[in-house]
Image (cartoon, helix red, strand yellow):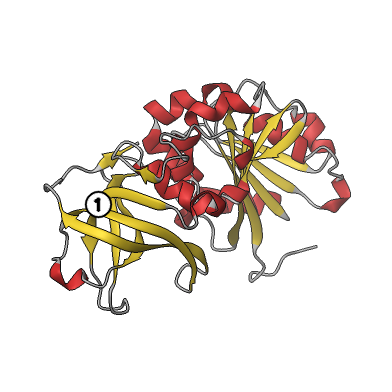
């Protein structure tokens, strides 16, 4: 059936580094595809360890087009390919080294799914050495698959490095032994004592604490914490409230973010904007409309100025 100009063609992006298992995953998507359900256009932007069987794909109604140059990702060329095959859907096997300019896609292409495939045994290598590629790759993903894991705990040393790059941990799944497990199945290597009367958060453990507070309310609700952080005031916050946190390099030096939580201190007016402080607080939780979820809320019990620290934390 001919498509009208206003009909959108759904596009699925399959992201991942070379030999991460993208082709194997894509083949599994097409396992039960029938030819009479419409043509799917498969754009392959790199050649991995698993090749495609063009004739077998054709029998299922899948048109394989391999693009060998990054310059081929322009609207004119993609419109030409789309007109040639008139697909009902498109799957793109991305090249991690190429930019994926979605604004260059034909106007009737609509990205509806973003899926990342990561190789468990090499994940640490990429997190430590190619983090600037990992951030954009995982951004806005609907699903993240970490495959080839002999056991879940092989990922324990890199969990805290991966967590800040995930918009939502619920989209991540670990494949091990033929089964799929949620991200939180990986054991946490907690960098401080949870049995201490006061949880002492250091600069080295700050990022872990920041994300762990969101993910594990039961660990922290009502607990006391001490940390060094910066003050950020805002007129939109209610009296006594401010943001307490630290600047962190989340992906690369060009990508710096303030990681902090809303806190309350009756004497906050005695401190200035951006003061570096040592604070002790009780961790409570409350629903915050701006995030549309329950978030940590720090009730400050003691706060004092500390030595200025202009260094961004890394992880």
The quadrant of the picture occupied by the N terminus is bottom right
Please tell me which residue lies in front, 255 or 260: 260
Determine which quarter of the picture holds residue 117. top right
Vertical arrangement, residue 89 with respect to residue 263, above or below: above
User: In this view, which residue lies farthest toward the front?
Assistant: 197
The answer to whether any part of residue 284 appears in the image is: yes
- For the question of whether residue 100 can be seen, the reply is no
Mark 1 Cα-neighbour bin, 10 Å: few <14, some 14–19, many ≥20: many
Q: Secondary structure at mark 1?
A: strand
Locate residue 87, reporting x and y percent: 71, 53
Point 14% across, 50% down: residue: 306
- Within the image, what quadrant is residue 10 found in? bottom right
**Which is more toward the observer, 111 or 314?**
314
Q: Is residue 237 above or below residue 128?
A: below
Horizontal side of 16 relative to 309 (left or right) equals right
Image height of 172 relative to 287, above or below: above
Q: Of residues 239 and 221, which is closer to you in this image?
A: 221
Q: Nearer the viewer, residue 92 or 131?
A: 131
Residue at image point 82% right, 37% down: 31
The residue labelled by disc 1 is 229
Q: Position of residue 15 (x, y in %)?
A: 56, 39
Left or right? Give the position of 80 relative to 302.
right
The quadrant holding residue 48 is top right
Horizontal and vertical percent position of residue 215: 53, 50
Q: Position of residue 194 (x, y in %)?
A: 47, 40
């Amino acid at each position: 059936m001919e498509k009208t100009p206003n009909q959108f063609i759904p596009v699925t992006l399959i992201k991942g580094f070379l030999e991460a298992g993208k082709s194997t995953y894509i083949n599994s998507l097409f396992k039960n595809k029938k030819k009479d359900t419409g043509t799917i256009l498969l754009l392959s932007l790199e050649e991995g360890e698993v090749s495609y069987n063009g004739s077998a794909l054709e029998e299922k109604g899948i048109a394989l087009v391999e693009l060998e140059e990054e310059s081929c990702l322009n609207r004119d060329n993609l419109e030409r390919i789309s007109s040639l095959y008139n697909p009902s859907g498109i799957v793109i096997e991305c090249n991690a080294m190429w930019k994926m300019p979605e604004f260059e896609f034909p106007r009737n292409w609509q990205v509806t799914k973003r899926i990342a495939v990561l190789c468990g045994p090499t994940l640490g290598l990429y997190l430590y050495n190619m983090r600037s590629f990992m951030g954009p790759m995982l951004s806005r993903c609907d699903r993240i698959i970490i495959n080839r894991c002999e056991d879940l705990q092989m990922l324990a040393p890199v969990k805290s490095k991966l967590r800040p790059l995930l918009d939502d941990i619920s989209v991540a799944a670990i494949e091990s032994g033929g089964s799929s497990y949620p991200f939180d199945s990986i054991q946490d290597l907690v960098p401080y004592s949870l049995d201490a009367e006061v949880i002492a958060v250091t600069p080295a453990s700050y990022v872990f604490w920041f994300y762990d507070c969101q993910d594990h309310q039961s660990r922290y609700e009502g607990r006391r914490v001490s940390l060094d952080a910066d003050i950020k005031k805002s007129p939109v916050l209610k009296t006594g409230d401010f943001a307490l946190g630290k600047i962190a390099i989340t992906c690369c030096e060009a990508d710096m973010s303030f990681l902090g939580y809303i806190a309350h201190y009756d004497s906050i007016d005695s401190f200035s904007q951006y003061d570096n402080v040592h604070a002790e607080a009780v961790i409570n939780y409350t629903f915050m409309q701006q995030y549309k979820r329950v978030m940590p809320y720090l009730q400050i019990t003691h706060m004092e100025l500390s030595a200025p620290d202009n260094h961004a934390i890394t992880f």
